[in-house]
Amino acid sequence: MDTPRRLFPSISSLRALEALDRLGSASAAAEELALTQSAVSRQLQTLETQLGVQLVLRDRKRLALSPVAQNYVGEVRQALTQIAQASLKLHVSPVGGTLSLAILPTFGMRWLVPRLPDFARLHPDITINMSTRLRPFNFASEPFDAALHFGEPDWPGTERLLLKVERVIPVCAPALLPAGPPRNPRDLLKMPLLHIQTRPRAWQDWFQKMEVEHSAPLPGTVHDQFTTIYQAALHGLGVALLPNYLIEQDLATGKLTTAYSDTAKIMGAYYLVWPKSKSDDLSLREFRHWLASQAQGDETLPR
């Protein structure tokens, strides 16, 4: 490779630039990198001198990236992530490799994790590292090989595998319905409804499918994820729309009861999503094939 040496900046200076862009201030970048602000400033000055381009706009003590630097750092961030991943694998990868997986907390813990011992038995040489993410992200900026995702994946440059159709059921603690479930779904409007941040229109969509018109905002409390809304329902704080995989045991034991009969409605599906660039990764390929066998035995998956 005969690329001029000046076009290969130090990793330290690139990390300083990336941290300044992401965190928005030299002080925050310095804290994250365990450096002084003056050291961060020197790193940035060295980078500008080496590249011959103004990357940082200086307004008294405030530093900000120039428009040219903002474009540059987007590409640099992806390269830094790839370097970090490759370096990490040198230290922790077993013979069969590792798989870094982003999971949805509730679906990951309730649906995927109980199945993983089977994968470990079949592929003991592959290590799966998991981190929770509630919202879509950019594979280029996050060190993941694949992700569990709810809804139609809209990441560019990715492929997907359908895992499970989700059916939600309105449920609550039995004490809220001493006379049993109401006969008319409209009656649920009179009860405290539990909402989840990641699906703000879930109840509106459910009432629409039940042919219940209601134009006013729906009352109730908002919860950040299924773990908290599930606990709120168990303790009698209201009626929640919960996935069947999460509540089957509680319905069977009587801890929860359906708030309206015969109301399981398809609301979406879960997918495994991965970048096309990683499609030939051996660990990911083995994991996809195994997951496909788990999904095929599941209930009424559309093809």
Image: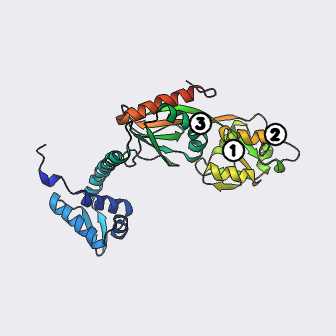
- Neighbor class of circle 1 (other Cα within 10 Å; few <14, some 14-19, many 20+) is many
Q: Given contact means CB atoms under 8 Å apart, are the residues at marks 2 and 1 in contact? A: no
Quadrant containing the C terminus is top right
Q: Which kind of residue does numbered mark 2 sit on?
A: Asn
Quadrant containing the N terminus is top left
| Mark 1 vs 3, N-terminal side | 1
Give the image quarter of residue 158.
Answer: top left
- Neighbor class of circle 2 (other Cα within 10 Å; few <14, some 14-19, many 20+) is few
- Neighbor class of circle 3 (other Cα within 10 Å; few <14, some 14-19, many 20+) is few
The percent position of residue 37, horizontal first and vertical second, equals 30, 72
The residue most toward the bottom is 60
- Checking the image for residue 241, the label placed there is 1
Given residues 208 and 125, the one toward you in this image is: 125
Task: Report whether 112 appears left or right of 74.
Answer: right
Q: Which residue is mark 3?
A: 268
Give the image quarter of residue 66.
Answer: bottom left
Q: CA distance from mark 2 to mark 3?
A: 24 Å
Q: CA distance from mark 1 to mark 3?
A: 13 Å
Q: Which residue is mark 2?
A: 184
| Mark 2 vs 3, N-terminal side | 2
Q: Residue at x 35, y 45 (%)?
A: 89
The percent position of residue 60, horizontal first and vertical second, equals 28, 75
Q: Which kind of residue does numbered mark 3 sit on?
A: Gly
